Image (cartoon, rainbow, N blue to C red):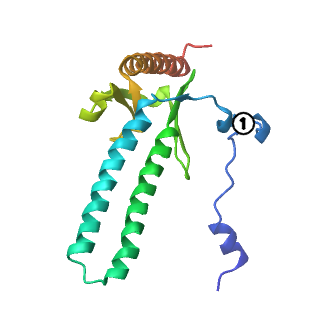
Amino acid sequence: MMTNSDIHSQVPPTLTGYDHGDLLPTTQLTPLQDLVLNKVDDNYPKLQLYTSGVLFGVIAIVTCLFMILASPLDLISKIIILPIILAIGAFATRLTYLKALTVCYGVFKDEFIMRQGLFWVSTTALPYTRLQHVNLSQGPLERKYQLITLKCFSAGSGEAEINLPGLPAKVAEHLRQHLLHQAAQNQQIEQQELNTDLDPQHD
């Protein structure tokens, strides 16, 4: 049977000597929903509308043909199900288009922000101090509309932390150079501050 002294001996000691600083009230936090962000090119939602329309259209047509030719269901059931399949395809195409309209980004002093999402909104903020490299990619359909996808990779991550589609070619290249310049500047300042802290002769 454990005594009170045994129980107290298993409780980790309270951490001392670390100052968290003053607690910030929520009124001093930057509200992300109030950030003014830039929309991507208007051709991007159109591209998503066309590609998703073709994709879901083909799926709906193939499904309908299967229902008509190979399904064992009776005629009345087929007549009821076929419009439902077509409506689902049209609804999915519409959602893809609306989601593409939500893609936006912002270039700030210390970080790069991207936001997207229709029902579940995702906001990603990448500080320049963590930015490792930036890639530009362009698929065949993007090339037709002169659009480029910008991908930002952070330190210690094998996948792109920010995947921003729908940028015009000139904007994408300008943005890539700006992000890399900001990352180099911030990382240089951070390294200088670290060297200063480690310098034993620094007063």
Residue wearing tag 1:
29
User: Observer-nearest residue: 94 or 69?
Assistant: 69
State whether residue 28 is above or below residue 172: below
- 156 vs 200, left or right, is left
Q: Position of residue 72 (x, y in %)?
A: 25, 84
Please name the residue shown 33% across and 44% down the image. Answer: 51
Q: Name the amino acid, label 1.
A: Leu
The answer to whether residue 52 is visible is yes
* Screen quadrant of the N terminus: bottom right
- 145 vs 25, left or right, is left
Please name the residue shown 55% across and 13% down the image. Answer: 201
Q: Position of residue 63 (x, y in %)?
A: 28, 67
Local SS, label 1: loop
Q: Quadrant of residue 85?
A: bottom left
User: Observer-nearest residue: 78 or 9?
Assistant: 78
Q: How many marks overall?
A: 1
Please rate how many residues cluster around mark 1, counting C-alpha atoms within 10 Å: few if below 14, some from 14 to 19, many from 20.
few
Please name the residue shown 42% across and 55% down the image. Answer: 90
